[in-house]
Image (cartoon, rainbow, N blue to C red):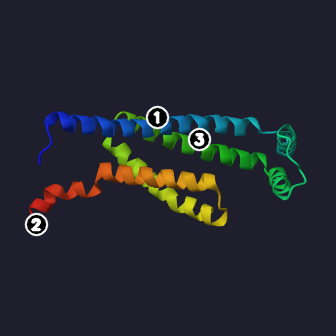
Amino acid sequence: MKAMPGEQTAVKLQRHRWLELIGALKLLQGAFFVALGFGLLRMLHHDIYMFALQAVETLHLDPDRLLIAKLLDKASLITDHRLKQLSALVFLYAALDFIEGVGLVLEKRWAEYLTLILTLALIPLEAVKLIHHPNRWIFAILLVNIAIAIYIASVVRPWGIFRKTARFC
């Protein structure tokens, strides 16, 4: 049964709304990572340990708890060089998010492929993190990314690229 032209338009609009939503989320995520990158750069030449200790005290956490003590120990090991590396990595990730977001909002086909590839590339890392450190938030993020990957894969339909050549086989 063939869909009516109006129904195809409604389905297409629905499809674009989801892609636009994913694109908008990518843009928000990119803005967050830009702010994080500048925050890391702002910490250059400052005592990271003291900053972390002040944050622990502000949040009324017990610095003697094992996890908090480990985080404070790790914070004391962060050098200016490492901060520069982390901020560069964060800015790179933000740039990828902006590229994906703009491409998806503008309904570019390459952005759908890029988002699919990057989302699929991160799923194994998130799964490993979930195995080593079970957490509801990591599990939720993993499920959302799997849902996004499945949705974009259904939209992109990579096998559709070969449709023209398949007729001649």
164 with respect to 79 (left or right): left
Kindly identify the amino acid type of the residue bearing the numbered disc 1: Ala
State the CA–CA distance, disc 3 to disc 2: 46 Å
**Quadrant of residue 48 in the image?**
top right
**Quadrant of residue 34 in the image?**
top right
Kindly identify the amino acid type of the residue bearing the numbered disc 2: Cys
* Numbered-mark total: 3
Q: Name the residue carrying label 2.
A: 169
State the CA–CA distance, disc 1 to disc 3: 18 Å
27 with respect to 159 (left or right): right
Q: Name the residue carrying label 3.
A: 91
Q: Is residue 10 above or below residue 90?
A: above
Q: Which mark's residue is nearer the viewer, 3 or 2?
A: 2
- The mark nearer the N terminus, 1 or 3, is 1
Residue 24 badge: 1
C-beta proximity under 8 Å, tags 1 and 2: no
At horizontal 74% and vertical 48% (from top left) the residue drawn is: 81
Residue 87 coordinates in the image, percent (x, y):
66, 43
Q: Within 10 Å of the Cα at label 3, are there few (<14), some (14-19), or many (20+) other Cα atoms?
A: many
Q: Within 10 Å of the Cα at label 1, are there few (<14), some (14-19), or many (20+) other Cα atoms?
A: some
In the displayed orientation, state which residue is furthest to the front: 1
- The mark nearer the N terminus, 3 or 2, is 3
Kindly identify the amino acid type of the residue bearing the numbered disc 3: Phe
- Nearest the eye: 116 or 44: 116
Residue 135 coordinates in the image, percent (x, y):
65, 57
109 with respect to 143 (left or right): left
State the CA–CA distance, disc 1 to disc 2: 41 Å
